[in-house]
């Protein structure tokens, strides 16, 4: 088990700047691994699918069917690049599009059953990977990490 003062170089006496530097390094490692895992999962999900296409599928899985303007805003993507990716996802059988029932001039994009099934498999794989990493953690440690990450993300504490 990691002692409280062992987690930060210099222990409890380390100045704030050193602690922030250590935090930055750990967050960079986490983000780099998340990107690598997303690319790996995208390749398993559909080998010719780009990582951008996989991000779109993930976003639609979480958000549900919606217009391209919402997808572009949610992913901070250029609309022309998004348009090309949406077309490729449709051709791959992962997306369907139809007129928006509220405004027939707009198009709504939704995942196909195939995309939903593959995303479920990807989430199971992702969950198993984190379960292996967290196997020795107590529920309290997992709860603490979750609360701190929510706080860092600006969402506030988690209620158990």
Image: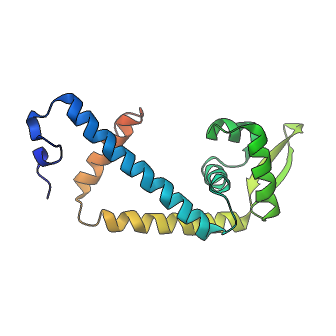
Pick the front one: 14 or 159: 14
**Coloring scheme of the render?**
rainbow
Relative to 77, residue 90 above or below: below
Please tell me which residue is depicted at 34% across the width and 36% down the height of the picture: 157
Q: How many marks?
A: 0
The reply, left or right, for residue 12 in relation to residue 111 is: left
Residue 67 visible within the image: no
Quarter-wise, where is residue 131 in the image? bottom left
Residue 65 visible within the image: yes
The reply, left or right, for residue 127 in relation to residue 51 is: left
Q: How far across and down, in percent of the image, does residue 47 sit?
A: 66, 69
Q: How far across and down, in percent of the image, does residue 16 sit?
A: 20, 29
Pick the front one: 44 or 61: 44
In the orientation shown, which residue stands out farthest toward the top?
16
Please tell me which residue is depicted at 56% across the width and 69% down the height of the picture: 121
Relative to 159, residue 117 above or below: below
Please tell me which residue is depicted at 74% across the width and 62% down the height of the picture: 94
Please tell me which residue is depicted at 58% across the width and 65% down the height of the picture: 120
Q: How far across and down, in percent of the image, does residue 96 sit?
A: 81, 57
The reply, left or right, for residue 98 in relation to residue 150 is: right
Quarter-wise, where is residue 15 in the image? top left
Pick the front one: 10 or 99: 10
The reply, left or right, for residue 54 in relation to residue 24 is: right
**Which of the image's four quarters has the N terminus?**
bottom left
């Amino acid at each position: 088990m990691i002692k409280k003062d062992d987690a930060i170089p210099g222990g409890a006496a380390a100045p704030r700047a050193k602690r922030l530097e250590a935090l930055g390094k750990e967050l960079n490692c986490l983000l780099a691994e998340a990107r690598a895992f997303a690319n790996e999962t995208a390749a398993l999900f559909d080998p010719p699918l780009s990582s951008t296409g996989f991000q779109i599928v993930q976003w639609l899985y979480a958000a549900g069917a919606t217009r391209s303007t919402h997808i572009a805003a949610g992913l901070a993507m250029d609309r022309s690049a998004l348009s090309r990716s949406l077309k490729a996802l449709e051709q791959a059988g992962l997306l369907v599009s139809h007129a928006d029932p509220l405004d027939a001039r707009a198009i709504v994009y939704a995942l196909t059953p195939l995309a939903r099934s593959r995303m479920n498999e990807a989430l199971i794989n992702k969950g198993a990977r984190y379960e292996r990493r967290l196997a020795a953690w107590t529920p309290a440690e997992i709860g603490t990490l979750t609360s701190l990450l929510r706080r860092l993300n600006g969402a506030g504490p988690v209620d158990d």
